[in-house]
Amino acid sequence: MSIFVIVCVIVVLIALVLLRLFKKPKVQEHYKVTQDIDPYKISINEIDRMEDGKDFEMYLFRLFLCLGYDDAYKTQDSRDFGTDLVFTDREGYRNVIQAKRYAISNPVGLSAVQEVYSSMRFYRAKKSIVITSSKYTISCEQLASYNGVKLLDRNDLIEMIELFKEQQYSKVKDIIEAEPYLSLDSWDDYMDNGKIVKKDRKAEKLVVSGK
């Protein structure tokens, strides 16, 4: 009888092990954003679960309207020329924003800076901003600092969300409208010939050799 019990226990244990091995992992459901989204109910966790970048753009659009940027509008999904959101700040300057909902392990590259900066003339904007749920590559930060593009990363976004829920709207606007970090503060800095620029030496050799 004892042998039978032992065999049954072993069979049950094997069955449990097999069940755990073949059990499908629970997939976290996507957070679907609608046009009537309430920004007060959104945290960084919901943003991380959003299905794609369009949901993040819609969230930011609703957030900016709630902050009092009454003229804010979301651009069309196609042919937006690198801008997802347009608004006018408290000083009366028009701003363009590119939104990047990326995973933490996937930093935003310099193409985001190139696109939003080049779109400024099309939207007749004075300033450009990139907002991401991730972070930025070093090259992206460098290019932004030379072109005056403001970068708001995951930490900035979390702070904005928390302050917004506390109804500290002015502080959220202070983060959004703060001046970007600039590598060049004056024309003299720009004219400094001491800056080392990497060149394509192979191309130069071809020109000298006449090939």
Image (tube, helix red, strand yellow):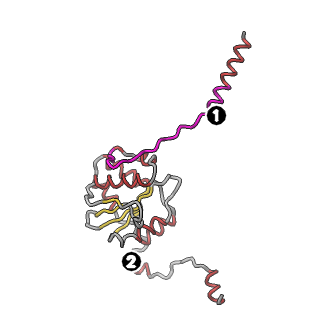
For image coordinates 45% across by 46% down, the residue present is 49
Distance of label 1 from label 2 (alpha carbons): 63 Å
Marked residue nearer the N-terminal end (1 or 2) = 1
Percent coordinates x, y for residue 204 in the rendering: 61, 84
Q: Which residue position is annotated with label 1?
A: 21
Label 2 sits on residue: 186
127 or 172: nearer the eye? 127
Q: Is residue 136 left or right of residue 148?
A: right
Compared to residue 201, the image places residue 143 above or below, namely above
SS for dot 1: helix
What are the residue bounds of the magenta stretch?
A: 14-40
Q: Quadrant of residue 8?
A: top right
Q: Residue at x 62, y 30 (%)?
A: 19
Seen from the viewer's position, the closer of residues 193 and 93 is 93
- Give percent across and percent down for residue 96: 36, 65
What's the mark number on residue 32? none
